[in-house]
Amino acid sequence: MRNGKIRTRLINWFAIRPITTGGLLFLVLGIATISQSILRNHVLKEDERNEMNAILTDAHLKIEQSLKNCYTTTVSLALTLDSNGIPQNFDTISKQLLKSNPLISVVQMVPNGVIKYIYPLKGNEAAMNLNILGVKDLKKEAENSIKTQKIYFAGPLKLRQGGIGIVGRLPIYNKNKFWGFTAVIIKLETLLKASGIKSMDKSNYYFQFSKRNPITLKEQFFLPSKTDLSKSYYVSQAITDSDSKLYLVAKKTYAIYPEILFSSILGLIVAISFGVLTTKLLKKPEELRFLLKKQEAKLLKNEMKFKTIIDQAPIGFAIIDTRSGNLMEANKKYCDLFGYTFEEIKKLDIKRLTHPDDLEKSLEYVKNLDEGKITEYSMEKRCVMKTGKIIWINLTVSQLCESNEKPTSHISFVKDITERKEAEALIEKSQARYKSLIDTIDGIVWEYDLEIKSSTFISKKIENLLGYSIEEYSESPTFWEDHIHPEDREFALALSAKENKNYINHDYEYRMLTKNGEVIWVRDIINYVFENGKPVISRGIMIDITIMKEAEKNLSNSLQLVTEQNKRLLNFSYIVSHNLRSHTSNIESIISLIESAESEEERSEMMRLLKSVSNSLDETMKHLNEVVNINTNINLVIKPLNLNKYIGKAKEVLSEQILSNEVTIITNVPYDAMINYNSAYLESILYNLISNAIRYRHPQRKPIITLNLHKQNDKYVIEVSDNGIGIDLVRNADKIFGMYKTFSNNSDSRGIGLFITKNQVDAMGGTITVDSTPNVGSTFKIYTK
């Protein structure tokens, strides 16, 4: 009761003092107006900054992503280097790289800092042989990439071949030594177009692109717009791996303040008006009613102004009935986005505007909003314009209702993100092209994360080279170690551990086992990627060099064969020269004696000698002819032969000698033993070795000849042993298989049998050895191919 009386007295006190009441009301409203203006000024500034940051970030992200895509191109160029630092298939691979990344206009390879390889060369000849480490304004930026050991984007700068561009250089190391650079050139105009800067609405903002001059350290600007930013309102972001910077500058630096000043003045006017009106209201109720009507008109005008501001907003705005999905209100930007007038779009619902593939998800969100499960949502989806064109939008929806009430409408904000989505699709397509390009490289490309100690990539070539799938490789952390050839595993793992500790680029060769058990040779070329001086990734390529290794082996075998053939040819030529010269000399001497003979008896004696020498010469020629036939017969028929059968043939031919000399022959050869050989050679070899064992038998004991067959290192070895007089290998080791070399006083020794046997074994690709002790016996071993 007492409180009611106090309130009544207070009201009456203000009522009888209209000027004081009006002044207090003005003071309160004035303070509220100024506070509101300051707050609005802050909000508008923050909104503008957020908008500028969003626009700048979007362009900056596209530029960054475009430049990052160039890294794969420079790495792919580096992989064209062979072990001698010479690019292989440069034009072919460069053409594919430019096709897969349309942002790049030119690719280069710069050994020792001098541009030696350019694709395409036409139109870029002026840059050929340019020494970038010898030009002052280029050297500084080139040295930055060497210092960081990663890609560095120099520029923008004026190109020697004309125009302005950005040059991305990646330092390359070959056999742990600096080789030079791989480089890509991006025209500034192309980069700006890819970033969306060219298509941006320039009514409120403009972009500027700059870099710090490496010599003067002053900032240079490259876009045709205002370059003095000291009095401008702007936001900026630095471009990674370069000295470049991207600016977004507001065209009207103080565009916010007139509106705030207007609002503040309007608020103060309203405050004064309310103060005066209150005063007059207390004085004249009739005047108050008049002023109220006037104020209503002003409010209506302000409402129209608010609607005008909404219509000019940079994003679409609409109020939609939650249950029906029908449009209740929309600004101009919203209608223009879909290509309809307001009257046309009011007749449409969400189903008509949404792309069929995104409709189900959109209706699910609307249903949850209507049922109160959510109060707002945001999504990216496709919509269909009036023309049928498909666009991407970013949609944000919130309820319009009082608390604890079921929503009947919601407000939607839409923004066109078609360009960003197209850029993302282009980037994804470009990445797919890079992956496809990597899969065409004739080698297994791999990558390993040194921090998490895990493989992060393996190319599809693993299926062709090793027969394993990418999944099989990924499922086994020790796949590489497990599939190194056992004989190379210790060496490969030790070398890998050593180089991984020092982080030095290297390459080495070893064998691997394929899925079907085959053995292939690979050359593993390994490089390290550093970030902030720390190695983070190792990557490389395993190239199949099996054919090269087989060629090296065949070449070595051929060289060995040619060397042996030359040695035999030299020995043969010496024998021919010596023996024929001896015979011809004898014939000349006898003829001379015949001419000087004094009687018919002397001539007859000389003629007998001449006939003897002639017969000896004929025998020598037969022996030489037989050796020639062995060494020139390249069409030997080789087939599986039963060894026991040919031993039997030799014994049959020598049966009289075996019987008369009481020879015992022991054969330790399986009945069905088969060897691949020429039948004539096998028969001759067995005959010569057995007949020699009989001929050089020991006079004090009965001869015993033993024949054995066994395997050694997957090769058959035929052994013929005897208990004869033996050979002094200390004196005669280098003469045993020589032509006409004899080691006993046996009258029928000619020294041709072992020589022919050696040539026959060599012609079959095998070897023959002898182990002998005087007065004990000899063992001959024939190793088949």
Image (spheres, rainbow, N blue to C red):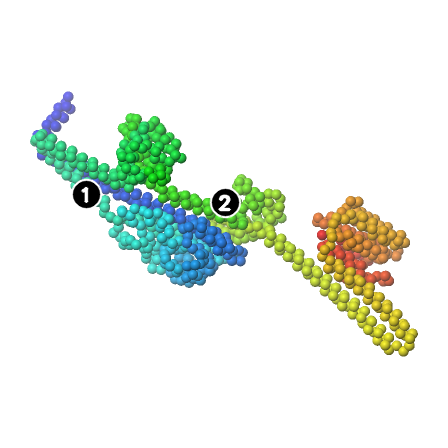
* Residue 78: x %, y % from top left: 48, 54
Task: Categorize mark 2 by other alpha carbons within 10 Å: few (<14), some (14-19), many (20+).
Answer: some
Q: Secondary structure at mark 1?
A: helix
Image-based side of 503 in relation to 775, left or right: left
* Residue 124: x %, y % from top left: 42, 59
Marked residue nearer the N-terminal end (1 or 2): 1
Kindly tell me whether residue 448 is visible in this rendering. no
The residues tagged by marks 1 and 2 sit, at their Cα atoms, a distance apart of 60 Å
Residue 576, picture quadrant: bottom right
Q: Which numbered marker is on residue 457?
A: 2
Task: Categorize mark 1 by other alpha carbons within 10 Å: few (<14), some (14-19), many (20+).
Answer: some
Q: Secondary structure at mark 2?
A: strand
Image quadrant occupied by the N terminus:
top left
Q: Which numbered marker is on residue 261?
A: 1
The residue that appears at 88% across and 57% down in the rendered structure is: 699
Question: Is residue 383 depicted above or below 548 in this figure?
Answer: above
Residue furthest out toward the top: 1
The residue that appears at 80% across and 53% down in the rendered structure is: 683
Question: Is residue 382 depicted above or below 162 in this figure?
Answer: above
Q: Amino acid at mark 2?
A: Phe
Q: Is residue 15 or residue 390 the one in the foreground?
A: 390
Q: Which numbered marker is on residue 317?
A: none
The residue that appears at 40% across and 62% down in the rendered structure is: 135
